[in-house]
Amino acid sequence: MAALWQKARAGADLVIRGARVVDPVEAVDARLSLRIDGGRIVELAERVGANGHRVVEAAGLVLAPAFVDPHVHLRTPGRPDEETIASGTAAAAAGGYCAILAMPNTDPAVDSAPILRALAEAAQREAEVATGFLAAITRGQRGEELTEMAELAAGGAVGFSDDGVPVASAGLLRRALQYASTTGRRLALHCEEPTLSRDGQVHEGRVAAELGLAGQPSVAEAAMVARDLALARYEEQPLHLLHLSARESVELLARARADGVRATAEVTPHHLVLTEEAVRSLDPNLKMNPPLRGARDRAALVEALRDGTVECVATDHAPHAAHEKDVPFEAAPFGVTGLETAFAALYTHLVEPGLVPLETLLERMSAGPARVFGLERPRIAVGATANLVLLDLEREWTVGERPFRSRSANSWLTGATLRGDVRLTVAGGAVVHEA
Amino acid sequence: MIRLVGDDLRPPAPAARRHLLSVADLTRDDVERLLGTARTFAASLERRVKKLPTLRGHLVVNLFYEASTRTASSFELAAKRLSADTLTVKSAGSSVDKGESLKDTALTLGAYDPDVIVIRHPQAGAPQLVARVTQAHVVNAGDGKHQHPTQALLDLYTLRAALGRLEGLHVAIVGDVLHSRVARSLLQAFALVGVRSTLVGPPALLPRELPVEATSEIEAIRDADVVYVLRMQRERMAAGENFVPSLREYAARWQITPERLRPGQRVMHPGPINRGVEIDPRVADSPASLIVAQVRAGLAVRMAVLYDLLAGGPVAVETLAAAEVA
């Protein structure tokens, strides 16, 4: 069974009163109050007695199932100066998440059961929100030999990924698909044809041409997506496509899904909000892989998220030390943080302009990723463990004005004013964030 | 002078520091002003005593992370001709060899309160970083494949001096556009002043997203008033890159030879030239070549840039003219 771990905490006794409760999967959208006893939702009604509990007056706020992030880099083991399980999950709590999945491209990579066990133990001591781990597909993520997937799955690995690098060999990926099928876990694939992306710094488009930066063409992603979908189809196995960025990739995914391939995908807030134009500033905090692409790509991603072709939002939260980002653009590492800004960024740039309904965004940030990785779905219903986020859609805030919970500050949004803020996060029945 | 108490309590509003990071930051007026100032300086360089007292007491730091003959020497000489103090730091033999980051090197040099930092760096975005962490005016002397704005300005100066105008000219830019910061700055500068450009070269070396005409047919150069030849960067043509099969085949198809030129066409090149690769020596040494004029223009144009940043814009030009009269 895929396992998630969280620091043991007493379940909250709490009443949340008068919120607009929105649970898209339960088809709830009404002004309601709810009572939580010992971390469990015990009453959901128009009027709920305090029963001696602390009462949160939530009139004018939205109460939704807390978020699930299927793609986080906790930099543990290896770079505790950039992030730890404690700091990364505190950032997640501040962003309204009740569960996150950490990627295995650490130092060393999570490619053996002892490393996974050490992480599980650390998560039980430190994790503010439920934390699961993907394990590597290949040893050391070198793309040569498969990891011992069965033992890793038995140790709780939620899935397998060589995220950060593609599985370059088609033959090896085929073996991985075949073997992973015996573990009941899904492969999550970073799609990038390395001989096409080469040393590309940004999307190969007009901005790269004008700035003289080496480009990664969209076809570097799409060619790999096509290959991976072809293998999934042939082997009749599911797979998950990480951080899609190109219109062509989404089109390939839609066609494959229509043909019955069990493929899922995620997209990041930065790809949903920005285009390559943002890179003109040469700000290293706008450098990520896959790169920000063109306006048509962005539009295709937004539409795919809206219509469900892409089922989840994933932050690809990638903390980097300040001194490693404070260098010329071309010398900077790829990656930006995202846990603390994801909802506000998407509410401000997708929901407010009318591109995606609020209910859809809430579904793609919670039920969608839970479904893809077979996790328990956060839900607002009597009897369920409380995994809740209380959102203030009116509150405006400027990113960077309050300190980040993350140990790193390489946010693509620093200085931006956003609408929508997380007021309260309940994860695994405990209050983990309040603002 | 009577001042209100409140004025003293308020910190003085910092004047926006001006930099020359990219041609994209310039307006047509800026370009005309800089070319006009350069013309004035070029005249002063004709005199027996070539040194002007204009920037006495100012410090210009040249920070070079890449090999350079033309650009480094002309910035240094430009500052000296204007009586500024100069300090040249090259990455080889400095703390850069010990692994010091660009940020720390910039902070170190910034501690001397330089008025201008001129920087050449192999990575795009380096001048922006220096502008962020120091109080100096920053001049980009070439960053990665991104920009080389003073080269574009001196090329405009050379073109106007040789052909009498800019607007309506047609320039064919031939060769490795992909890796050329000169081409990027030049295309923006040409667009500003109304010069038409056509890119000519092997497909893999012409970025297809640039908003200009492009062709792989070398015959296309015949329509142009000027052929601007880019350096084939041998280091970028290493085995396995396959931008072109070989330099020999490149030369056979795209080298600028006397036979490919039409009478009256002029030829430019930002240097250093690879004789026998992108340009036939007979062309480089012919009267059609403006290559030496480009180098000469570089000095006057860089004097104009330093002067413009430190003495400040349109007003300064009038002051300069007045000084000339006096």
Image (cartoon, coloured by chain):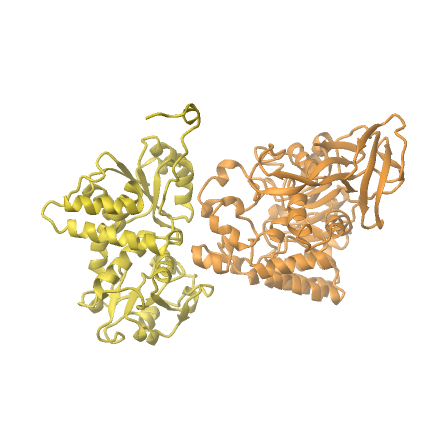
- Quarter of the image with the C terminus of chain A in it: top right
Closer to us: A331 or B247: A331
Q: Position of residue A114 (x, y in %)?
A: 69, 37
In the displayed image of the protein, which residue is found farthest to the left? B48
Q: Position of residue B39 (x, y in %)?
A: 21, 53
Q: Is residue B271 visible?
A: no
Q: Would residue A57 be found to the left or right of residue A216 on screen?
A: right
Q: Would residue B150 be found to the left or right of residue A154 on screen?
A: left
Q: Is residue A415 visible?
A: yes
Which residue corresponds to the image point at 32% horizontal and 54% vertical from the top-left? Answer: B31
Which residue corresponds to the image point at 18% horizontal and 67% vertical from the top-left? Answer: B286
Q: Quadrant of residue B93?
A: top left
Image colour assigned to chain B: yellow
Q: Would residue A180 be found to the left or right of residue A279 on screen?
A: right
Q: Would residue B161 be found to the left or right of residue B94 on screen?
A: left
Image colour assigned to chain A: orange
Q: Position of residue B24 (x, y in %)?
A: 40, 54
Closer to us: A172 or B309: B309
